[in-house]
Amino acid sequence: MELHPDLVRTLITEDELKERISELGEEIARDYRGKNPLLIGILKGAVYFMTDLSRALPIPLTMDFMAVSSYGAAHKSSGVVRILKDLDTPLTGRHVLVVEDVLDTGLTLKYLVRSFEARGAASVEIATCLVKEGAQAEPVDVRYVGFTIPNEFVVGYGLDYAERYRNLPYVGVLKPSCYTD
Ligand code: PRP
């Protein structure tokens, strides 16, 4: 696919995403066979990774979604996690796999893991498509990582800038002239 004019370069292609997600699917299926995991997708960024990863998992599972926000429209993490939509599913005794698009500062996932454990989950693990290298405020224990990427402003495959670019089927680096803060 041709590079979007607002991007500096492609970081991860569609084919690379597909191949890595299929590997992750095999690994997660092995680990969760017989456990009926509950995949929790964190809206909105994780929708693409959630739909692709869940279809790469040949095991019984259920899904739920939660919407939180730590960024607002700005491109830097604020450190404030707001719950915009909560889960429909009780977590007592469930094996939870949190599905995220990107681990940046890690504040969102730290908050979510603590919250899911407090709701009685039997286990809580994280699958994130991307990890930004060196961006975490403190170490975060992530079981499944798609790709480790440089700490740049990336969009596509669910990641936005001011709600744009989520639907690009690849991950790319946004031109600095395209963001204003
Ligand atoms: C992004 C992303 C993660 C979070 C990661 O969400 O989807 O949830 O930020 O950042 P952190 O590691 O610094 O906490 P955002 O709040 O932008 O919402 P969105 O998914 O709707 O774009």
Image (tube, rainbow, N blue to C red):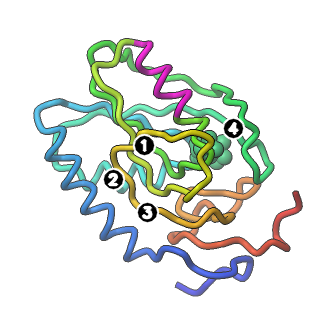
- Residue 147, disc: 3
- What span is in magenta? 110-119
- Identify the residue position indicated by label 1 in the image: 99
**Which element type, helix, strand or loop, lies under badge 3?**
strand
Point out the tag, 3 or 1, that comes first from the N-terminus. 1
Distance from label 1 to label 2 (Cα)?
9 Å
**Which element type, helix, strand or loop, lies under badge 1?**
strand
Point out the tag, 4 or 1, that comes first from the N-terminus. 4
Q: Amino acid at mark 1?
A: Val
- Which of labels 4 and 2 is toward the front? 4
Q: Which residue is depicted at the point 43% across and 54% down?
A: 49
The answer to which of 6 and 104 lies nearer the viewer is 104
Point out the tag, 1 or 2, that comes first from the N-terminus. 2
Mark 4 and 3 residues: CB-CB less than 8 Å, in contact?
no
The answer to which of 118 and 47 lies nearer the viewer is 118
- Residue 91, disc: none
- Identify the residue position indicated by label 4 in the image: 70
- Identify the residue position indicated by label 2 in the image: 53
State whether residue 64 is above or below residue 44: above
Mark 4 and 2 residues: CB-CB less than 8 Å, in contact?
no
Q: Is residue 148 visible?
A: yes
Distance from label 4 to label 1 (Cα)?
16 Å
Distance from label 3 to label 2 (Cα)?
14 Å
Distance from label 3 to label 1 (Cα)?
14 Å
Mark 3 and 1 residues: CB-CB less than 8 Å, in contact?
no
